[in-house]
Each structure stands twice: as C-alpha cells, then as structure tokens.
Amino acid sequence: MARHVRGVVLPEDDVRDIWLVGDRVTFESVPGAVTLADRGFILPGLVDAHCHIGIRPGGGPIEAVDEARRLAGVDRDTGVLAIRDAGSPYSYPELDDDPDVPRLARAGRHVAPVRRYLRDIGVEVDATDLPRAMKEQAAAGNGWVKLVGDWIDRAVGDLAPAWHVDAMAGAVAAAHAAGARVAVHTFAEESVAALIRAGVDSVEHGTGLSEEDIDEMARRGTALVPTMINVATFGSIAAAASDKFPAYGQHMVSLRDRFPSLVAAAYEAGVPIYVGTDAGGGIEHGQAAEEMLLLHERAGMSTVDVLRAASWGARAWLGFPGLVEGGLADLVVYDTDPRRDLSVVRTPRLIVLRGRLTRPSIMS
C-alpha cells in the first residue's frame, strides 16, 4: 500500500508532497495512496551515530537478538531511524533488514588492549595481533571497526594510549585495507592526536583534542561524534576513581569542563559533527533529542546544523539516502518548525520507518 505525506520538507524548506511506495520515496503522484500527514515539518529519519544495542543497560553483552531489537525500538520510537552501532559484543546481522529496526551501520566488537577495557565487551589483543583483529572485526561488521584508542592505565594512574601509537596507525591501515572505516574511542590528548594523523574516519568523544588536532580534522574531513551526554558523566567516573587514581580523576574532570568549548571550536573550524548518544551500558537509549539540544545550547551549533548532524547529513555520511527521488522511506514529522524551536524534536508527531507507520497517530 502506497502512503502519502505533505508538509515542509527540510532542509530545502519547500512544501512538497511525498509518496512512499514500499521502502522508496517518489515525488510522482501515486493514485490511491493513503495520506498520513497533510501538514507539518518533515525530516529524513534521525540518526544516533554512536549507539550500542548489543550492550545491555548497566553493562555487559546482551544475551539474545530480541534484546537488541527491543533496545533499537526504544530509539526508533523517538524518531531515530538509523543507528551506527559503534561496537557490539554480540553479533546480530539478522537485524540489518528487520522491518522494525532502524537502519544499521555496524562495527564488530571493540578492539581493545588486554585487561585495560570494559569486561566482556571488546576483543582484547596485544600490539602484534592488532592488524589481524581489525580485519576480523571488519568482517564481523558491515562497514565499520571500533578501535579503543586509550583507557586508564593503572600502572600510570591516568589515561594512556591503548598501544604504542605506531601500532595503532598500523591497525587503522589494516582496517582500511579490509574495506572498513574506523571509529576510534578516545578521551586523552596523545592518542587522539596520533590517530587523527593515522587517518581514522571518526573520533568518538574526542575530549583530548587540541586546536591543532581540530585544524587537522577539518583539513582531512575527519568526523567528530562528541557524545556530550556521555562526557557529562565524567564527574561520577572521577569520583569513583579518585581515591586510587587522583590524577586520573582530576584529568577526567578537566576534560569534561573544557569539552563544550572544544566542540564549539570544532564546529567553527568546519569539522563534520554528528549526533551520537553512546547509549548502551550506562547511558539510556532514546536520548538523541537531548544530545541535539546539548549541541545547540552548550556548543553553540545552529539549529539547522544540529538538524543536519542528526538527520540528512548523518544519513548521507552513513550511506542511507534521505528524502530524494528513489531514496529510503524514513521520515519524521513535527507539528512545528524545529529550526525555530529545537525542543520539538522531543515530540515527533509521526514516524515512518521503511515506508511503514511506527506510530498510530495520523495528522489531520
């Protein structure tokens, strides 16, 4: 059954009629199509570009594919219709074409240092095994590999690179040779500087960025996924660790406090920025709207650029076409203009995934 939606289509700002035939968009009239909306502001489906539906709330791997499906549904019901799962200890390729699950760009398991990362989450390897592990995890995902660039080193008492930076550069090259893009988890200064220059495709968190690093990212087109919701939790992480590792605790608080200005500097420099919540483990699903508001209110991104970072821009980056002729039939409709009041993204009126209505309400 064909469906029809009419409204102001962003980012073009034109009132248009859109027909959805199966999982494709057309602007050619389809007789007999059911009208789902005849007013409102229409966006291509939102994206959470850093999410983990393979990690259960509170931490640890999910145990069955239905749990991943349920977590993805929490995000879907807020208007997130594409997810980049930035590392999963549980493989679920059968969800790639599930009609009830957002579009998935998946990494395999996190590639992590031995006994220096979250328990049971990553595949832990030493430096000599890094290239092999990156190739294996490239095959386990569908286009991405997640590399843990730094974590606390208890012998040092602070953040430190996960491996020697030369070994990590080789790991990036191995993933690229296997046809995958590389997302790197990084909090600290030394590791993020080296990994940007090694050619990673996206920096996750990136709290240790310098002005020179930002300029290099802008030059290369390296993406930043700030996960501001995650970085806001650094105070509690520091408090839990400060008795044993005071330098680490102080470092984490310092990174948290400077982060909004750092993201603002990246934005001003023209670094591509995308919305990601880091949902999974300690971060609840369904918070893409809150991440969008933080990018606007704390990092100074314009509402249009936040919408680009969460919608049509992020979809293009991940390879999910938007509302163009022959594009994918994913859209969200809002009653009022999110460019004027970004908080409206918290309350979508209509959500359509793969050409199917995911909410029962029909606008009139």
Image (tube, rainbow, N blue to C red):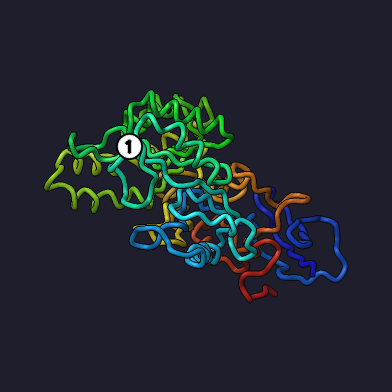
Evaluate whether residue 71 shows in this view: no
Q: Position of residue 14 (x, y in %)?
A: 72, 53
Residue furthest toward the left? 243
**Residue 359 horizontal/vertical position (percent):** 61, 72
The number of discs equals 1
Residue lying farthest to the right in this orientation: 31
At x 51%, y 67%, the residue is: 66
Left or right of 212 in this view: 274 = right
Please name whichever residue, 327 or 66, is drawn nearer the observer in this view of the structure: 66
Q: Position of residue 313 (x, y in %)?
A: 60, 44
Q: Residue at x 53, y 42 (%)?
A: 144
Disc 1 marks which residue? 150
- Image quadrant holding the C terminus, namely bottom right
Q: Secondary structure at mark 1?
A: strand
Q: Would you say 107 lies left or right of 42 here?
A: left
Residue 199 at x, y percent in the picture: 49, 27
